[in-house]
């Protein structure tokens, strides 16, 4: 059973949501959930939250859930999602903003030794390279 999420005005105006906007500069409210980003993403099958739902959760202020997700770290920043967005929402910048929030909180989010060997062999190389390039401070 899926855990229910409470939506409140406090969530929508949270400090984390403001920080995501400040870092990314993206107006997530321009998204109308067409799903083109998720449909075009070459790494979506490896993500726990598809890109269009990342944007929806950001719209609703669920930043803590997003920074705990694997999706921002799997995103290869290939910008296919951004190019396909009819509203011009730069989803790749949102993903980078989420990674920056994590890094600024001083998390070590991913350790290559903790990724199952079979999964490492399946993941696109660009995703692994992009991930570790992004986590170097």
Image: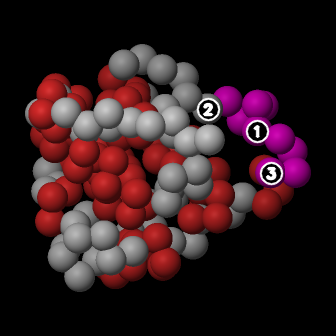
For marks 3 and 2 on the same chain, the one whose residue lies earlier in the sequence: 2
Specify the segment rendered in magenta.
111-119
Which SS does the magenta portion mostly show?
Answer: helix
Q: How far apart are marks 1 and 3 (CA)?
A: 7 Å
**Residue 114 can be seen, yes or no:** yes
Q: Looking at the image, which residue is at 55% across and 28% down? A: 109
Relative to 80, 69 lies left or right: right
Q: Looking at the image, which residue is at 33% across and 48% down? A: 57
Whether residue 54 is situated above or below residue 2 in the rendered picture: below
Marker disc for residue 119: 3
For marks 2 and 1 on the same chain, the one whose residue lies earlier in the sequence: 2
Whether residue 38 is situated above or below residue 69 in the rendered picture: below
Secondary structure state at the residue bearing disc 3: helix
Q: Distance between the residues labelled 2 and 1?
A: 8 Å
- Residue 95: in magenta span: no
Q: How far apart are marks 3 and 2 (CA)?
A: 14 Å
Task: Look at mark 2 in the image and give the residue it sits on.
Answer: 110
For residue 32, what is the image quadrant? bottom left
Residue at the outermost right position: 118
Secondary structure state at the residue bearing disc 2: loop
Q: Looking at the image, which residue is at 42% across and 17% down? A: 106
Where does the image place residue 104, in percent across and percent down from the top left? Answer: 33, 23
Residue placed most toward the observer, 2 or 40 = 2
For residue 115, what is the image quadrant? top right
Residue at the outermost top position: 106
- Residue 117: in magenta span: yes
Query: Which quadrant would the N terminus be assigned to in this image?
Result: top right
């Amino acid at each position: 059973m899926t855990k229910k999420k409470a939506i409140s005005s406090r969530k929508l105006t949270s400090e984390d949501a403001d920080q995501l906007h400040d870092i990314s500069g993206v107006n997530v409210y321009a998204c109308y959930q067409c799903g083109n980003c998720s449909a075009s993403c070459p790494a979506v099958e490896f993500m726990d939250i598809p890109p269009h739902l990342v944007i929806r959760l950001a719209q609703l202020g669920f930043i803590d859930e997003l920074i705990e997700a694997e999706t921002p770290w799997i995103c290869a920043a290939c910008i296919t999602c951004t190019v396909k967005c009819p509203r011009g929402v730069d989803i790749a910048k949102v993903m980078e903003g989420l990674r920056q929030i994590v890094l600024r909180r001083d998390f070590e989010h991913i350790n290559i030794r903790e990724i199952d060997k079979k999964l490492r062999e399946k993941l696109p190389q660009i995703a692994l390279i992009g991930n570790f390039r992004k986590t170097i401070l």
